[in-house]
Structures are given as C-alpha cells and as structure tokens.
Amino acid sequence: MQIGLRVYKVQAYHNHKVQKLTSDKGPADILNFVRNCCAGFSKNPLDDGTSKMVRFDPSNSFKNSAHGLLRYGKYGYGSEVEDRKSGVVQHIRTVDQADTIPLYYRFWFAPGKTYGLIGLQSFGGSSCVDIVNRALANTYEMMHPDWRLTIAKLMPNDAKLYGNRVVRSVQLVRKNSSQNIVEKALRPAGQDTKVDVEFSLKARGGGNFGRLKDLKDKIEGHLEIGGVDFAGAFASVKVGSSYKKIGVLGVSSTAGVIDLTDDVMLDANKHPTFKSVSKEAERHIADFAKILG
C-alpha cells in the first residue's frame, strides 16, 4: 500500500460527558481550535524529540472543514544526495536538515454533532498520525483543563462502517522476507536481497469470502500457506463505484487503512496531487459521516 488514508473520530468531553460541537468560539468549537492549531504549527513545527518533525501547510478553509499538507520529515543524521545514475553528489544534508515528504490532512467538524472526523494520508508506510494527534490532544488540554479531546481510529471493518460489505478478494503479505522463499523461481540478485511476498486470492463468479467484519476472526491464526507464514492481510470491498483495499490484519500501520493508490493522480515527484487526494479524502470522510449519522 503506497498511499493510504487513516480516518479518526474526534470527540470533546466535559464532566465525563461527550459534548455537541458548536461554532461559538468556546471549548466545543473544535473547528476553530483546529484551524488555529494548523496556523500555529505552520510557524512552529511539531517535533517529537526523536528526530521527526511535522510542519503544517494549511490551504484555504471552507465550511465545516480545514485541509492542507503536512510536511513530515526526519533529521538528526547527515547524508549525501547523489544522482542514482551518475553517482554525482548533488547535495550534502546536515544533521539539522529534515528530509520531508508531503502528506495530506483534512478535518471535518459540523456544529450539532457529537463528533468530528480527521483524515490523514500516509505514503509508503510513512505516517505522522501519532505526532499530530498527540499534539492536538495536548494543546487542547492546556487550553481547556476541564475538558478532554479524544481521537480514536475508525476501523472500516466495523459493522457500522464497511463491515457488512462482502469481500471478493484477499491479499496476504509478508514484508522483508529472505530470498529463500522465491530464490528457486526468481533468483534475486545479491546474496542478502530481501523481498516482500504477497499472496492474492480472488473469488470467481458470484463467490466471496464473507463479510469484512468477520474476516479477521476467520483468517487469524491461519496465515500459513505453502510453508510461508504471512504477517498481514488486506481485503477488497466495494465502496461507492470502486473497490477499496482495506487493512484487516497485521501491524498497526496497515490495519484499518484505506488504500488510495489506484484512485489518485501522481505528480512529477511520485506523490499524489493535492486535488486528487483531497477529493478522495473528502469522499471517504463524507461516507463515514453518513454512516455515523
């Protein structure tokens, strides 16, 4: 999964009771709070103290929403950036320079609801959700000590979301495997070559593998095929007019993530264009909001 989308449910609590969101500039006006955070984090980037940083790059705000890019990077070590063909060093990066990538974000908060939604993009396994969500919750608590902001990941395989959708295809994955698994067939170059192994199953005709919400329990503990132990699984279900690959089982970085790879346009740097990823995030957040009510 190269380009993914994680969706989170945001709620504000006061006296241990969840509060309806408002637009009165008070503690329940989460949209105003988030917009101010986005502006503040653009001037003072988030830093988790372990060589990772996030700088917000807000775009124009619109009704009930805020969106933009997260400039997510790593620093703390020097490196040489060279042309991969000629080997000529183009740039020497110092320990204080961060190697950043753009990740899209979208916030949606409607007055009168008891929840809001956050959509955060990932790229090639890189995500800054922990830094962003922790910063939002901590900043809110400092501003409103008697209130609490909770941010919980929404799992598409839950019954209320896409859980009742039937699964037509399943993909099992194993990352960083030794080449012994495939060396007889492909003989990878290099003695220490590591490979990612994927095993796809697709139901033919009108068949399927059951409902998404039941798939985890069905395959957990049964991820060995042909002597190969797989670490995670994705399922494809129909969402709107297209099929989406959704993480079902595996490490936390992929479980519950919606795959956008085949639905976005890429720019010259092989990152999704702002317009295309914004459109997909908006579509999924609207879908989640409709289901949650």
Image (tube, rainbow, N blue to C red):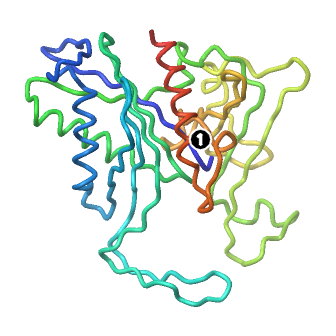
Q: Nearer the viewer, residue 54 or 268?
A: 268
The image quarter in which residue 137 lies: top left
Type of residue at label 1?
A: Ser
User: Which residue is the extreme one toward the left?
Assistant: 145
**Which residue does the image show at 24% across and 41% down from the upper left?**
37
**Which residue does the image show at 70% across and 23% down from the upper left?**
238
Above or below: residue 126 compared with residue 141: below
Q: 77 left or right of 170?
A: left
Circle 1 residue: 276
The quarter of the picture where the C terminus appears is top left
Q: Nearer the viewer, residue 287 or 4?
A: 287
Q: Secondary structure at mark 1?
A: helix
Q: Nearer the viewer, residue 28 or 174?
A: 28
Above or below: residue 96 compared with residue 108: below
Question: How many numbered tags mark residues here?
Answer: 1
Above or below: residue 293 compared with residue 87: above
Q: Nearer the viewer, residue 219 or 151?
A: 151
Q: 51 left or right of 285?
A: left
The image quarter in which residue 150 lies: top left
Q: Position of residue 118 (x, y in %)?
A: 40, 31
Above or below: residue 192 compared with residue 215: below
Q: 266 left or right of 131?
A: right
Q: Position of residue 100 (x, y in %)?
A: 43, 63
**Which residue does the image show at 68% across and 84% down from the upper left?**
85
Mark 1 crowdedness (10 Å alpha carbons): few <14, some 14-19, many ≥20: some
Q: Position of residue 263 (x, y in %)?
A: 67, 39
**Which residue does the image show at 37% across and 28% down from the upper left?**
152
Q: Position of residue 207 (x, y in %)?
A: 85, 19
Q: 77 left or right of 221?
A: left
